[in-house]
Image (cartoon, rainbow, N blue to C red):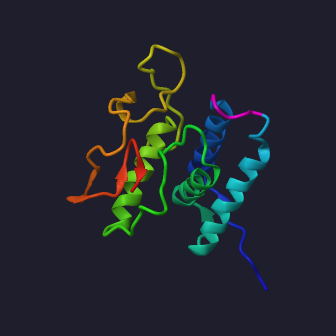
Amino acid sequence: RATSQPTMSAPAERLLVAYFTRQRQEDGRSQARTTIRLLEAMVRLAQAHARLMFRQEVSLQDGMIAVLMMEVSLGSAAPLLGPISALRSSFSTDPDAELAAVERLVLERLGLADDGAPRPRPRDDGGDGFDLRGFGGSAASGYCGGAPEQVGGKRSRFDEQCGFY
């Protein structure tokens, strides 16, 4: 029985490393608990998704799926996408557009350019490093229930402050 072992593309590798680095730098998370095993697990998840999609190379989308799976499973103190409620989630009418919107948001919050190269952004609070609080860097509303993002003329079930709903 032959199995494929997809190779890692450069954009997927940069995405996984950027997410791992963010997890290591997270204030509310113990650095001792975020070990290289987390990165290894994300690589295995991305490779598994690439195999599922019959790809020979791990794409940025495969890496993104691994990041999203980690976000859901880790339940970190400051999640990248906000809280994700399985109870209040439903299937999107346009999943491709919604995935593209989530991908843009994740890349923005990780400080990655379109090609996956790291791009530092100034923080609103005058601190150094990356602004990981979202588009514009402002925690303006501070509560859930803001207007959902428009995707393809339809209301998305993804809210920047609240995550999926």
Locate residue 47 relative to residue 67 in the image: left or right: right
Q: Quadrant of residue 33?
A: top right
Q: Which portion, as a residue range, is magenta?
A: 27-31
- Taking the view exactly as shown, the residue that stands out farthest to the left is 153
Decide if residue 95 is on the left or right side of residue 43.
left
Q: Is residue 63 among what the camera can see?
A: yes
Q: How far from the left and from the top, in percent, is residue 70?
A: 62, 53
Image position of 27 with respect to 72: above or below: above
Of residues 87 and 135, the one nearer the viewer is: 87
- Examine the structure image and report whether residue 20 is included in the region drawn in magenta: no
Kindly identify the residue that appears in the image at 47 percent across and 27 percent down.
Answer: 131
- 29 drawn magenta: yes
- Residue at 29 percent across and 50 percent down: it is 148
- Left or right of 18, for residue 93: left
Would you say the magenta stretch is mainly helix, strand or loop? loop
Residue 60 image position (x, y, % from top left): 53, 55
Q: How far across and down, in percent of the image, does residue 20 sit?
A: 66, 41
Q: Quadrant of residue 6?
A: bottom right
Q: Is residue 16 above or below residue 128?
A: below
